[in-house]
Image: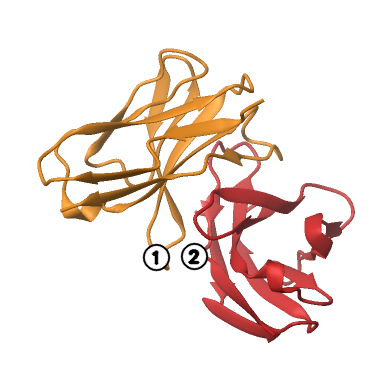
Amino acid sequence: NAGVTQTPKFRILKIGQSMTLQCAQDMNHNYMYWYRQDPGMGLKLIYYSVGAGITDKGEVPNGYNVSRSTTEDFPLRLELAAPSQTSVYFCASTPLAGGPDTQYFGPGTRLTVL
Amino acid sequence: AQSVTQLGSHVSVSEGALVLLRCNYSSSVPPYLFWYVQYPNQGLQLLLKYTTGATLVKGINGFEAEFKKSETSFHLTKPSAHMSDAAEYFCAVRKGGSEKLVFGKGTKLTVNP
């Protein structure tokens, strides 16, 4: 199993550009998450999904969109990039939620908006 | 609402010394508790977790943590630090029935030779 994969690893965007961060998992997990990590702030939840076709907002959803058309994929879309979106983005998945199941993390995408 | 407080954003120890990273949580019901480690330029990796039962939990790489309900704490310890333990450590909590993990702000551990 590859686990949770994310592409790209690094990206530089200009203000106002758009891009999609890709996330895929091959563990047949129902629950998937997007976090952003800023220095000294821990991880903040952007969006999450409890299954194909179902998504919900997390703590910091503004400026982002998601979709979940398959169990495996959970892309994160930035429509109009802003400097405040400079961050490291992590995708995670877990088989079940609400219990003790571990969240498995991808290696991250480092995004810089200039 | 749940919250997690990690005391000390930076902790520095000598190689061979005790490692103690502190985590306190607030939750209206007994939660599930996790410690994750993040090595430079990598994703988060589970160190250990508390679900139910024994309050002393052993994890990978010689780490352990003790759940103390009366103190609402879940401190992480390792008897003897190794250079390879240098990383950032995150405590996280999930209330039973919730889909979401709440993370602390992290503690960066430096191990000096």
- The residue identified by callout 2 is B105
Say if labels 2 and 1 share a chain.
no
Chain letter tied to red: B
Please name the residue that numbered disc 1 is placed on.
Answer: A39
The residue at 55%/63% (across/down) is B4
Dot 2 alpha-carbon crowd within 10 angstroms: few under 14, some 14 to 19, many 20 or more: many
State the residue at coordinates (78%, 81%). Answer: B18
Crowdedness of circle 1 by 10 Å Cα count: few (<14), some, many (20+)?
Answer: few
* Along the line of sight, the residue nearer the viewer: B2 or A41: A41
Q: Quadrant of residue A105?
A: top right
Q: Position of residue A67 (x, y in %)?
A: 35, 21
Q: Going by the image, does B18 lie left or right of A27?
A: right
Chain A colour in the picture: orange
Q: Nearer the viewer, mark 2 or mark 1?
A: 1
Chain under label 2? B
Residue found farthest to the right: B54
The x and y percentages for residue B36 are 64, 55
| Residue type, mark 1 in image | Pro
Q: Residue at x 68, y 49 (%)?
A: B46
In the rendered image, the residue lying farthest to the left is: A16
